[in-house]
Amino acid sequence: MTQERPFDLLNRSVGQQVLIRLKNNMSVRGKVTSFDAHMNLVLENAEELEDGELKTKLGTILLRGGNIIFVSPV
Amino acid sequence: MTQERPFDLLNRSVGQQVLIRLKNNMSVRGKVTSFDAHMNLVLENAEELEDGELKTKLGTILLRGGNIIFVSPV
Amino acid sequence: MTQERPFDLLNRSVGQQVLIRLKNNMSVRGKVTSFDAHMNLVLENAEELEDGELKTKLGTILLRGGNIIFVSPV
Amino acid sequence: MTQERPFDLLNRSVGQQVLIRLKNNMSVRGKVTSFDAHMNLVLENAEELEDGELKTKLGTILLRGGNIIFVSPV
Amino acid sequence: MTQERPFDLLNRSVGQQVLIRLKNNMSVRGKVTSFDAHMNLVLENAEELEDGELKTKLGTILLRGGNIIFVSPV
Amino acid sequence: MTQERPFDLLNRSVGQQVLIRLKNNMSVRGKVTSFDAHMNLVLENAEELEDGELKTKLGTILLRGGNIIFVSPV
Amino acid sequence: MTQERPFDLLNRSVGQQVLIRLKNNMSVRGKVTSFDAHMNLVLENAEELEDGELKTKLGTILLRGGNIIFVSPV
């Protein structure tokens, strides 16, 4: 194990924009307002993207962590 | 971890309309009446949507949390 | 968490007809006689439906909860 | 919770014929000789069915519970 | 629960030939030399079958239990 | 069990480039900055590869371990 | 349970060549240097095979156990 832990990245992402790739090939972008140990996340002003372009405005969403491939600070 | 937690969003959604995206590509809209730690939810006046349009009226449903991608207050 | 819990809906459904949507796109209708914490259910006079029409009479079935998307009182 | 529990149906099925629908769309029929808490089952004179017709005689099988959609006494 | 348990079948299968159906539609035949509580199995002289015919000789294999649909003594 | 453990490889990979194959057929390359017991990993300067060629620059990502097939030091 | 246990095969495979079949139909060959209770394995000089022929040299890999169908000493 390392001193730095993966969830530290989520912690630093609170209040920041992230891009999230999901298992069903959806991509979602939004501002993290909270997360938990299952990687469940609340995003504000979330947007569904397709080929990097805005597809649907989703508003505030509670995203289940089990659907996530990766989370990336924008 | 943050002070605010993802499930706080569900707590504030009780008695409110939410839109839920499921893993099988279904979307469901309805009023939350209860939820638990597995994100199992009871929705009243639930409706199945297709391309944002009403497809089927489902009435009251107990939805298993494991099928959820995201929950969004409407 | 709320006072009312999702499994209360199952409790009130014992002896009642429910419609169940499964992950494999099957729909099943029947009278609940028992359930457990995994959402395993016994249904009496269960029927498999296709497009809302009776496809097969299944009789009494023990349905594994893990296959369920939602349960709806009829 | 109810007094009667779903696994009571399995208990009463020992020594009886059951029909089992599996997640891979297989159906299996046979006489239950034992089961456990994971719904693992041993069936005697098990037969694989296709469209309700005998496809293959399987003899005695230990079936993993995780593959089951439902179990139905015949 | 019954006196006899499903894993008793595995216990009696040690040193015997079994036929195993897997979730990916593979069938494997071989002699059981050991198993554990996850239904992980070691088979000797294992053979992959296709339509009941020998496809590939696999030799000794450690098979993960999670892939199994059923195990049948030959 | 062996003295050397698989996670020792991750430990030695901190600060190093790795190539990761994911279940959805994506390949990702980047420098490991942290990991945890679920094989969740943070990668810096991560790149999505297709047929070994750069497809998309991802920047810093938190990758969920459950998506991984293998991790390979480059 | 048996005296001999399935993981004993892995233990004897340390320092030896194994062939591994994965759920995504990949086959991997390499020398085991370590493993753990989840069947996570480190392989040296790992090679991806297609129809038994070398497709890609992978070098050293940490393979997640959950992807494995079977492991076979070569």
Image (tube, coloured by chain):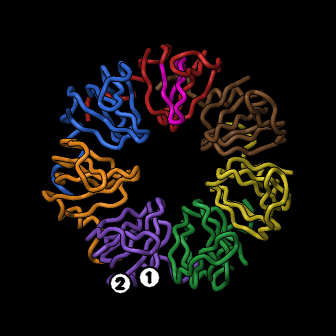
Chain colours: A brown, B yellow, C green, D purple, E orange, F red, G blue
Residue at the (49%, 25%) spot, across then down: F20
Q: Which residues are magenta?
A: F19-36
Chain hosting mark 2: D
Judging by the rendered image, the residue that carries numbered circle 1 is: D73
**Could you classify mark 1 by the number of other residues whose Cα lies within 10 Å: few (under 14), some (14-19), or many (20 or more)?**
many
Taking depth in this image into account, of A69 and G19 the one nearest to the observer is G19
Q: Single out the residue that lies furthest toward the left.
A: E15
Q: Is residue F35 magenta?
A: yes
Tell me the residue at 35%/30% (across/down). G50
Give percent across and percent down for residue C22.
Answer: 60, 64
| In the image: residue F15, left or right of residue F47 | left
From the image, give the main secondary structure of the stretch colored magenta. Answer: strand
Residue at figure coordinates x 43%, y 29% from the top left = F70
Q: Is residue E62 above or below residue B15?
A: above
Q: Secondary structure at mark 1?
A: strand
Task: Using the image, determine if residue C60 lies above or below residue C69.
Answer: below
The answer to the question of whether label 1 and label 2 lie on touching residues, with beta carbons closer than 8 A, is: yes
Label count reads 2
Rendering quarter of residue G52: top left
Picture quarter with the C terminus of chain F: top left
Residue at image coords 39%, 27%: G62
Find residue D16 and name its label.
2
Is F61 rendered above or below residue B52?
above
Left or right of residue A1, residue F60 in this image:
right
State which tag comes first along the sequence, 1 or 2: 2
User: The residue tagged with tag 2: helix, strand or loop?
Assistant: loop
Res E65 seen here: yes
